[in-house]
Image: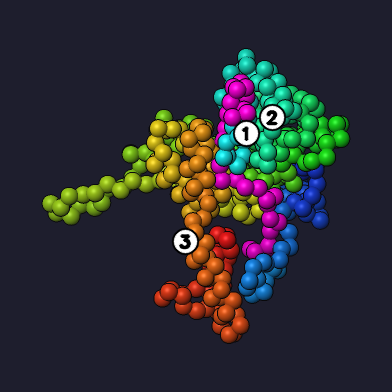
């Protein structure tokens, strides 16, 4: 498996056992001179444009055709250790859209069996209401993953919505979890399919992100695991997310004038890459953790950055971060009103036979429709 081992060839990835919209008619493998070559599963399915002016958009265009992700509100994902039993009912009553009970990094190896039992009991007994309920299982290269998957499915009932899979390095990692999940679901006759969220937190995972995103019909979301990514790239930082004061540029020399230092965003490339792959395959891109829980303004700034890039939400590693994520990832009344005005103006333009019009002195055209519909 490729979770931490760069020598694991991506070409050996296998198709999901749970075949679906991502499986191409010709199959997921093509035979070439060099042997079996993995094709990212064909998640791009013919789509139909929606909205007031959807008739203008040709659904046959490949760059507009995709299967929409499963509809889930995903502004805030509250993570809590599976060892902290008392926190689970409190989290269930919080304003978080997604509750993620963790069996991986926040749980010591000696505590993992008990944490798994706690999670199973919570899934059986706690009322989570309409929230999405997920469990972050252990990675493919651990000795705990198969029991995480098998015992939770066998014992916890139907309430679980998703597995969050850490340290995903290539499509084979997704396949491994899919295989276990499919077998366990069939064994107990589970009716509701468990979805997958994959955490990208290594150079291997980022370089193989397209095959990961298209590896299974279960895939719903891609997440950025910034701390492990920083460690695996040997980034000189000890922060979990956020900016780095040493990452920036100094303005050119101009005589005796003072020079200015402009901070950069050290995480911009991986974040953008995750968003692009997620949207390509119809998944939800989700920003990862921000470790300084005493800096709400810093957390909000990271939320705004993610929202502008195209993320749908962000992790909350402390309850105080939930409201901040919900606020930023919920469009304001002003944004919604402006988006509706754009749609109304373009609908009128369509009736008038125009392709582009001016609204408040700014040009809007067919691309503006997609931007506005993303808000409303």
Measured in 3D between alpha carbons, the distance from the residue under mark 3 to the one under mark 2, in whole angstroms, is 38 Å
**Residue that mark 3 sits on:** 334
* Quarter of the picture holding the C terminus: bottom right
Question: Which sits earlier in the primary sequence, circle 3 or circle 2?
Answer: 2
The quadrant where residue 125 appears = top right
* Quarter of the picture holding the N terminus: top right
Residue at horizontal 81%, vertical 31%?
A: 184
Residue at horizontal 67%, vertical 74%?
A: 55
Residue at horizontal 60%, vertical 42%?
A: 97
Q: Position of residue 175 (x, y in %)?
A: 73, 38
Given contact means CB atoms under 8 Å apart, are the residues at marks 2 and 1 in contact?
yes
Residue at horizontal 74%, vertical 28%?
A: 124
Nearest the viewer among 162 and 173 is 162
Nearest the viewer among 317 and 272 is 317
Measured in 3D between alpha carbons, the distance from the residue under mark 3 to the one under mark 1, in whole angstroms, is 31 Å
The label number, if any, that marks residue 126 in the structure image: 2
**Residue that mark 1 sits on:** 92
Question: Which sits earlier in the primary sequence, circle 2 or circle 1?
Answer: 1
């Amino acid at each position: 498996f490729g979770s931490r081992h760069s020598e694991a060839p991506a070409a050996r990835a296998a198709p999901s056992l749970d075949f679906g919209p991502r499986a191409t008619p010709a199959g997921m493998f093509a035979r070439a001179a060099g042997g079996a070559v993995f094709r990212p599963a064909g998640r791009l399915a013919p789509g139909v444009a929606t909205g007031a002016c959807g008739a203008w958009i040709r659904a046959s265009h490949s760059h507009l055709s995709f299967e929409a992700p499963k509809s889930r509100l995903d502004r805030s994902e509250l993570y809590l250790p599976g060892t902290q039993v008392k926190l689970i009912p409190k989290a269930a009553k919080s304003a978080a859209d997604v509750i993620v009970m963790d069996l991986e990094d926040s749980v010591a190896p000696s505590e993992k069996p008990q944490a798994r039992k706690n999670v199973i009991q919570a899934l059986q007994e706690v009322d989570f209401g309409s929230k999405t309920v997920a469990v972050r299982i252990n990675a493919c290269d651990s000795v705990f993953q198969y029991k995480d998957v098998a015992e939770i499915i066998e014992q916890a009932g139907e309430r679980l919505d998703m597995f969050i899979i850490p340290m995903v390095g290539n499509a084979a990692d997704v396949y491994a979890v899919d295989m276990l999940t499919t077998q366990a679901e069939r064994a107990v006759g589970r009716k509701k399919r468990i979805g997958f969220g994959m955490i990208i937190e290594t150079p291997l995972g980022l370089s193989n992100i397209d095959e990961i995103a298209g590896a299974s019909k279960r895939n719903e979301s891609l997440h950025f695991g910034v701390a492990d990514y920083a460690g695996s790239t040997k980034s000189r930082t000890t922060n979990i997310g956020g900016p780095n004061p040493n990452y920036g540029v100094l303005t050119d020399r101009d005589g005796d004038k003072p020079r200015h230092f402009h901070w950069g965003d050290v995480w911009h490339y991986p974040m953008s890459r995750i968003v692009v792959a997620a949207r390509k395959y119809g998944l939800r891109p989700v920003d990862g953790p921000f470790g300084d829980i005493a800096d709400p303004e810093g957390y909000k700034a990271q939320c705004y950055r993610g929202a502008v890039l195209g993320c749908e939400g962000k992790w909350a590693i402390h309850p105080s971060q939930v409201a901040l994520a919900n606020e930023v990832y919920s469009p304001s009344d002003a944004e919604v009103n402006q988006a509706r005005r754009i749609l109304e103006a373009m609908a009128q333009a369509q009736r008038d036979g125009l392709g582009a019009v001016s609204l408040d002195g700014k040009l809007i055209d067919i691309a503006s429709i997609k931007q506005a519909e993303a808000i409303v």
